[in-house]
Amino acid sequence: MNTHSDEVALEFPLFFRIYKDGRIERFAGTDTTPPGTDARTGVQSKDVIIDQETGVSARLYLPKTTSTSSTGKLPLLIYIHGGAFCICSPFNRTYHEHVNSVVHEGNVVVVSVNYRLAPEHPLPIAYDDSWAAVQWAASHSKGSGPEPWLNDHADFGRVYLAGDSAGANLSHNMAVRAAADGLDGVKLAGLVLIHPFFGNNKRDPLLDYLFPTMDKSGDPRIEAAEDPKLSTVACSKVLVMVAENDFLRDRGLTYYEALKKSGWGGRADMVEAEGENHVFHLSNPNGEKAAALLKQFVSFMG
């Protein structure tokens, strides 16, 4: 007997629908593409489990050229995907191809984080999962971690955090947490925030649903510009990328200005893509402005 109900209990267009029987139907980011060796770039990728209990995992990337410095090691990028905390993964084609391009153009090793998604795993679980992945990566800093690719090829004196949209929010928060809790043997060199999602003083029904325990008077993880710990961001440079027609543009600019005024001692840069929308580089990766964004991204890590 079919026990499924097609009655809809709740729907957030573009993201997901919840049926009365508890099923969740996501509208994007559910496809997967396998790891392997990319025929065009020679970039290798593979998937690893970080925490058997929670299922937190990552897709690792290794460029074709793995020795360019006197140490024979390459910068490490920890990348956190976007998707409003509730859709997408490192394994869907859009993110796989984007990160593959970053690895090829930037000649960096990448840990692309697969955190658990809300609403099944409500926020702040994504923050805890992302931190677990950062700590796992850092456990290789002395060359004795569980993953040979990181032991052999990652330079833990040149570690970058980056993400887009919700992933940019998570990346910022990892840089704040690194300052508070420390990452032994790791030098966090920089932070790249692409079209970052940060809250403002307007009510967000989706966020309210995904983060039911959030302090409605203001959570510093969401409203980063108001965070008293903003000046502690644990890196010496930050790149904030915004798009002219993005509904999140002003929030990214507010973060950028607040960071510069916070007393933080690093260098903040801001780049704006004229005439473009939110995460345009993912929806149109072959466009001229997507190519410019990729170049700016990898140049920052140079």
Image (tube, helix red, strand yellow):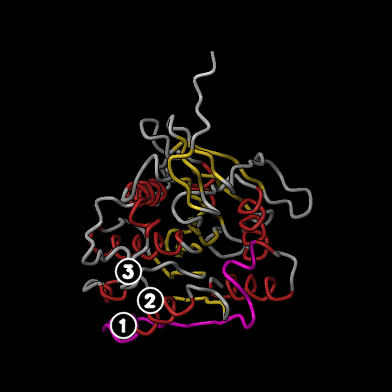
Sequence-earlier tag: 3 or 1? 3
Using residue 31 as the reference point, say whether residue 116 is left or right of it.
Answer: left
Q: Which residue ends up furthest to the top in the rendered image? A: 1
Q: What stretch is highlighted in magenta?
A: 259-282
Q: Do the residues labelled 1 and 2 touch (CB within 8 Å)?
A: yes
Q: Which residue is under mark 3? A: 234
Residue 265 location (% of width, % of height):
31, 82
Q: Which residue is under mark 2? A: 236
Q: Distance between the residues labelled 3 and 1?
A: 10 Å
Report which quarter residue 186 is drawn in: bottom left
Count residues near mark 3 (Cα–Cα under 10 Å), then give few for <14, some for 14-19, many for 20+: many
Residue 208 location (% of width, % of height):
33, 56
Label disc, if present, on residue 228 of the rendered structure: none
Q: Are marks 2 and 3 in contact (CB under 8 Å)?
A: no
**Label 3 is placed on what type of residue?**
Ala
Q: Magenta includes 280?
A: yes
Q: Is 183 drawn above or below residue 248 in the view shown? A: above
Using residue 75 as the reference point, say whether residue 295 is left or right of it.
Answer: right
SS at mark 2?
loop
Sequence-earlier tag: 1 or 2? 2
Q: Which of 14 and 229 is in front in this view?
A: 14
Q: Which residue is under mark 1? A: 265
